[in-house]
Image (spheres, rainbow, N blue to C red):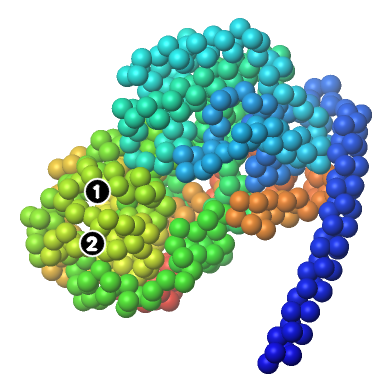
């Protein structure tokens, strides 16, 4: 044994020595190649000359250090240049004292802005696109005025703060929700007020810089990441103020994909909802149904995500999950699914039926108290932060929530509360329950796709659609709960399932554009697959996904392609086959 152990030690030391020597040589070689590519990228003459009547495309990329953004943005810019467009790129150089890439639970380094600028420069040079810094368009007076304005605001005036005509308090609110990841901002907390003032000062400076830059460049379209966070929001608003068309982009709903919004931020849904409404009565083709079924299955198995999956791949089985919340497959259960609203709760079209999500929960638990024979399981969204969980527990005393993020709580005999950190299988509850109520979670759409009754409590992206039951007021919400046929065995409705599946296709899958030129080997990491020094693959006609994106940016194609007619009978057969495959056979059509 000693000899074997000694031999293992020698092998490990030898392997470590080889790895160190080889790793050093590989690092030197890669740095040498990178520096050569970067230097080549400084040659502006390598960019194609724009046509005389070129479409002028501007891109403000304040988060270019995040390659899941820059790989897409710079690839599309280069492709647009090859299509004859006049492309301009603006990067951020410490324009704001607070950054959207920093959250309350992170510990940023003192030199984070220098590191970010270095990485953004490397990304732009690697993909060979000239750029400018936003500070070129911000003078000392702009900075001083913005800083003094933010510092002089009263504590109770931060939320509604206006810098001239710019509603910066509202524009920065989304960043504040993301930064603290809670359902409500406590402006009595000095730390919250400090961060808000920093965001406001940075937004005021960036707004002045973006407006000056856009007036100088005079683009036809602004190519912009999401439009929701503070710096991209001010660029979005500056462009719209100047009458400039904006195409926002964000990750799609499948791996290696991108979605687009025209004159909307990624947290808005008017355009997609209109498409979904227009297609409500149009059946899917069998191939589209197969794609939707595959996506639904991937969601259940926590795979093919374009973001970190909220549910763990390894989680308790269906029987264990039901036992953990104290229900059986024979119980008539109402499943309540909360939403992770720290990103989208700042939009003015949310929280219209109930003022906030916790009021919906309070109403639900009051209904449960009045109906002790009904079983209720509240499943908190797995992406809810500890701060959000604590805030819900504080504002809804009926929860009597557990003190941690994992333990199932039983505040009353007929209510179980599953906190965000508990790994149980949400889909086991969806499959078993008699009905689902949700505040707007994507899981509500998935539940509808199984043919289940879904009661929507907030004016979310699918509120008011014919395949869900939508509450218009707190009292109407209780009426909808009472109407569920609790005395009968749960039934699935194939028409509801078809409606949910059509929505999945129109809202999530059809708009998610993939290309072989940008891939996501990691959840928050993207890489390009073409050679930066040989951009022939970016030419029009070489990649359908890239062509679709550039066509939308150039105004040659709509963001949402119309869905062609399909055979209703074929869709019905495919939907019923899907329901049977997941153990929910629907009644035979009569």
Helix, strand or loop at label 2? It is strand
**Residue 495 appears at what percent x and percent y?**
35, 61
Residue shown at 61% from the left, 51% from the top: 524
- Mark 2: give few (<14), some (14-19) or many (20+) Cα within 10 Å: many
**Residue 424 appears at what percent x and percent y?**
36, 68
Which residue is identified by label 2? 409
Quarter of the picture containing the N terminus is: bottom right
Residue shown at 42% from the left, 71% from the top: 315
Q: Is residue 26 left or right of residue 378?
A: right
Which residue is identified by label 1? 393
- Indicate whether 449 appears above or below 98: below
Q: Is residue 481 visible?
A: yes
**Residue 214 appears at what percent x and percent y?**
66, 18
Find the distance from the CA under tag 1 to the CA under tag 2: 11 Å
Q: Is residue 434 left or right of residue 349?
A: left
User: Who is closer to the viewer here, 578 or 61?
Assistant: 61
**Residue 307 appears at what percent x and percent y?**
54, 53
User: Who is closer to the viewer here, 50 or 363?
Assistant: 363
């Amino acid at each position: 044994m000693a000899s074997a152990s000694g031999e293992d030690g020698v092998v490990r030391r030898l392997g470590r020595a080889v790895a160190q020597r080889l790793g050093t040589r590989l690092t030197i070689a890669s740095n040498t190649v990178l520096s050569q590519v970067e230097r080549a990228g400084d040659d502006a003459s390598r960019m194609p000359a724009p046509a005389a009547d070129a479409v002028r495309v501007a891109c403000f990329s304040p988060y270019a250090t995040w390659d899941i953004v820059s790989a897409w943005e710079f690839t599309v810019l280069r492709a647009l240049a090859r299509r004859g467009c006049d492309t301009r790129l603006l990067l951020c150089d410490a324009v704001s004292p607070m950054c959207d890439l920093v959250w309350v639970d992170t510990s940023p380094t003192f030199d984070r802005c220098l590191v970010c600028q270095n990485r953004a420069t490397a990304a732009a040079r690697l993909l060979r696109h000239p750029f400018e810094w936003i500070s070129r368009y911000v003078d000392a007076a702009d900075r001083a005025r913005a800083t003094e304005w933010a510092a002089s605001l009263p504590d109770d005036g931060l939320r509604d703060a206006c810098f001239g005509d710019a509603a910066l308090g509202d524009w920065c609110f989304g960043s504040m929700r993301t930064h603290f990841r809670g359902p409500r901002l406590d402006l009595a907390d000095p730390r919250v007020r400090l961060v808000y003032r920093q965001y406001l000062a940075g937004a005021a400076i960036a707004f002045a810089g973006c407006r000056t830059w856009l007036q100088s460049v005079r683009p036809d379209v602004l190519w912009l990441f999401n439009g929701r966070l503070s710096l991209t929001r001010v660029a979005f608003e500056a462009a719209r103020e100047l009458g400039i068309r904006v195409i926002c982009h964000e990750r799609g709903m499948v791996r290696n994909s991108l979605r687009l919004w025209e004159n909307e931020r990624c947290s808005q849904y008017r355009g997609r909802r209109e498409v979904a409404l227009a297609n409500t009565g149009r059946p899917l083709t069998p191939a589209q149904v197969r794609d939707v079924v595959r996506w639904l299955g991937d969601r259940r198995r926590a795979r093919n995500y374009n973001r970190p999956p909220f549910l763990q791949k390894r989680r308790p089985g269906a029987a264990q999950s039901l036992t953990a919340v104290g229900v059986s497959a024979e119980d008539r259960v109402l499943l309540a699914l909360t939403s992770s609203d720290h990103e989208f709760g700042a939009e003015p079209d949310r929280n219209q039926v109930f003022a906030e999500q916790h009021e919906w929960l309070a109403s639900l638990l009051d209904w449960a108290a009045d109906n002790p024979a009904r079983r209720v399981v509240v499943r908190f969204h797995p992406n809810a932060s500890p701060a959000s969980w604590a805030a819900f527990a504080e504002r809804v005393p009926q929860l009597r929530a557990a003190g941690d993020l994992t333990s199932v709580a039983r505040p009353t005999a007929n209510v179980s509360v599953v906190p965000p950190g508990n790994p149980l299988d949400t889909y086991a509850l969806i499959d078993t329950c008699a009905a689902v109520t949700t505040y707007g979670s994507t899981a509500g759409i998935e539940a509808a796709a199984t043919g289940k009754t879904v009661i929507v409590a907030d004016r979310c992206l699918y509120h008011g659609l014919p395949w869900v039951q939508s509450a218009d007021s707190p009292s109407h919400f209780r009426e909808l709960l009472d109407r569920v046929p609790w005395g009968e065995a749960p039934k699935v409705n194939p028409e509801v399932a078809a409606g949910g599946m059509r929505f999945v296709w129109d809202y999530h899958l059809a708009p998610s554009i993939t290309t072989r030129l940008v891939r996501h080997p990691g959840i928050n990491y993207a890489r390009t697959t073409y050679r930066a020094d040989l951009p022939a693959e970016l030419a029009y006609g070489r990649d359908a996904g890239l062509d679709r994106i550039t066509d939308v940016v150039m105004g040659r194609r709509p963001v949402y392609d119309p869905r062609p007619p399909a055979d209703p009978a074929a869709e019905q057969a495919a939907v019923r086959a899907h329901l049977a495959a997941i153990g929910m056979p629907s009644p035979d059509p009569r």
